Image (cartoon, coloured by chain):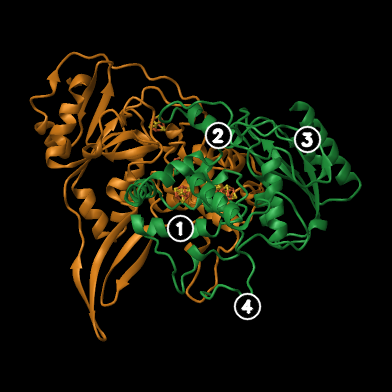
Amino acid sequence: MKEITKKIQEIAARLFAEDKIDIFLAWAQQGEHEFHTNSYVARSAEDVKNIVFNEYSIYNVSNSLLKFRDSQERIGIAVKGCDSRGIVRLLEDLQIKRDRLYIVGIPCPGLKDPLAAARNYGGFSRKEEEGLAWKCLDCIQPNPVIYDELVGTEQTPRQQGDRFAKVKELEQMSADERYKFWEDTISSCIRCYACRQVCVACDCRTCIFDEMKPQWVGRENSTSDNMMYHLVKHAHMAGRCIECGECERVCPVNIPLMLLNKKLIQDVGLLYGGPEAGMQYVEGSKPPLSVYRENDPDDFL
Amino acid sequence: MKVLSKDKLSTALNKLSDSAEVFVPMQKGKQSGYFTWKSFEEGQDELMLEALNVYQSPKNAVFPQTERIYGIASQGVEVNIDKTYEDTSANIIFGARGCDVKGIMAMDLAFLTKGYEDSLYKARRSANTIIANACYEPGPNCFCNAMEVNCVEPAGADVILHDVGDGYGWEVKSDKGEAVTALLADILEEKEVKLPAIKPFIQNVDYSGVAEKLKDMFDHPLWDKLAEPCVNCGMCTYVCPSCYCFDIQVKMWGEQGYRFRTWDSCMFEEYSREAGGGNPRGASKERFRQRFLHKLQFFKERYGTPLCTGCGRCMIVCPTDINIVRIIDAVKEAEINA
Ligand code: SF4
Ligand code: SF4
Ligand code: SF4
Ligand code: SF4
Ligand code: SF4
């Protein structure tokens, strides 16, 4: 990883020197512990030395692009497989232009969750295992799908067995059992919206949950309002979630959000086929369910 | 000293639960926080009194995330309040750490002083007893000592537990404390105990002068840098034991409904949005700055104590590794050029 860090730093330095970029998005470590690694914006050749790629560089940096969607900077960005799919999401959603980006791809060896490490270090609650983050164990696309330059060697996907096994387990339940399962799970959501804020696919300028006139979804911390939140949030993810797993990773109450996303990925795949969200970028292409036509054959529109 | 032997813990919690909701630190499935002892499921949940702390603070016990204020019944143009909700049923927080007790003390200041009393909060709080759990071994993120908290003798606790190995020394601090002690008269034992020595704090935080210095730092460029990674989720505010902002909203089904309040977060765009659509804190950085100025400057100016209690939670949950200790340090180091 030291090698990769060095190479990213070199590329970023070169891009600054050649005046090809104004900022470079990657990760940096703050403080003494490696798990204090997070998203970082290098603004000059000076800053480049702070960039790291270590075993905690798990944050999906494509999300950081949203902060720059309205400005003009030319942006260098380092991405893992999942992050690169986030870039495809933003390109398809017309949130950023391809020619503003110089993408450095990193085939990802699988990383650890800095939040789990921070919890363990802080002595809060029970000790957790600190192997590869589960989202990395479940990864189907460690290699970047879009890039201008690649750093490191190709990795093989780590996902094993039936990807939708858990979804199928739930599908086997009776409707009542399933309702009970989600009721129990979702009633503990504290509506902090971290799952929305870290989500690159949540790129709406004004989120439906922040609308006040009218207020579409109640803000009560109750099972029904919580369920509405999750139904709506996830319905908006159908065909758009790029499976980066960030939402579930950051959730402070461990809601199994990926179970919902996986169900949608499975169903959208069955209904529409084609490549999964963010797996390839073809200019002008749109994900399923993102196209509106007046002559839609379904009459519910 | 009176001692609650650890093997009588569940008996004591059962006893207290006869007359009150008792909130205890628990690992409940995948969640970690304060939950009622009545909801404890043997074999599934785990009592976390021995852990340094739990993820969610006990503020829910006195300031629930969502609570109803009054019911509404309307008839044509006439709107009537047909019911008010004030909860005066007894509740006990059992095993709160000093930082979390301080969180409630801070909420007391905000909700009960300076000529304004929040009746919902007052009702709950007057029926609330705090049994604190003294800290003899601060954790790596703890810095309550820098935020005016005595982690062994937290001010505001009604009873303080002192872990002495096979039991808890039971130190009564107030009349409310006496009352819960009376409930446990035949469970508590009188014993000689030796209190442990306090281990030193691992973090070294210096808050002195920070509130004063911040007065001149509203427009300081440091906020741009510090706020850059923050994604404005509300996690840090929701796990914080002292964040007390709320919003008041209404639910109506035809002619019937109720008004309720629910936690809100200064990190949300919608929090500071005005009725006309303007937003004085429209930018992410402005919301970020608000949170830390409120914690470190504004509250101190108004109430004489910081609103951060040093529990270290926000830096454990933050998805982008924002760390209030690093912010305090950065403020200390910052140069102010006029
Ligand atoms: S991150 Fe978790 S607790 Fe927060 S809103 Fe999302 S699901 Fe709810
Ligand atoms: S819904 Fe979750 S997994 Fe999907 S893109 Fe958003 S953060 Fe990533
Ligand atoms: S911050 Fe202080 S009171 Fe809180 S857990 Fe740490 S040592 Fe105890
Ligand atoms: S500081 Fe961290 S936890 Fe708080 S709003 Fe920002 S990103 Fe979320
Ligand atoms: S600001 Fe952070 S450290 Fe301070 S009391 Fe709140 S959660 Fe704890």
Query: Which mark's residue is nearer the viewer, 3 or 2?
Result: 2
Q: How far across and down, in percent of the image, does residue B222 sit?
A: 65, 48
Q: Earlier in the sequence, mark 3 or mark 1?
A: 3
Q: Chain letter for orange?
A: B
Rendered green, the chain in question is A
Q: Are marks 2 and 1 on the same chain?
A: yes
User: Is residue B307 in view?
Assistant: no
Label number found at residue A49:
3
In the picture of the structure, the residue carrying the numbered disc 1 is A231
Q: Mark 1: give few (<14), some (14-19) or many (20+) Cα within 10 Å.
A: few
Instruction: Give the labeled residue for mark 2.
Output: A134
Q: Is residue B185 left or right of residue B225?
A: left
The C terminus of chain A: image quadrant = bottom right
Q: Secondary structure at mark 4?
A: loop
Question: Which residue in the structure is indicated by mark 4?
Answer: A295
Name the chain under label 2: A
Q: Is residue B304 above or below residue B287?
A: above
Q: Residue furthest right?
A: A18
Label 4 crowding class (10 Å Cα cut-off): few <14, some 14-19, many 20+? few
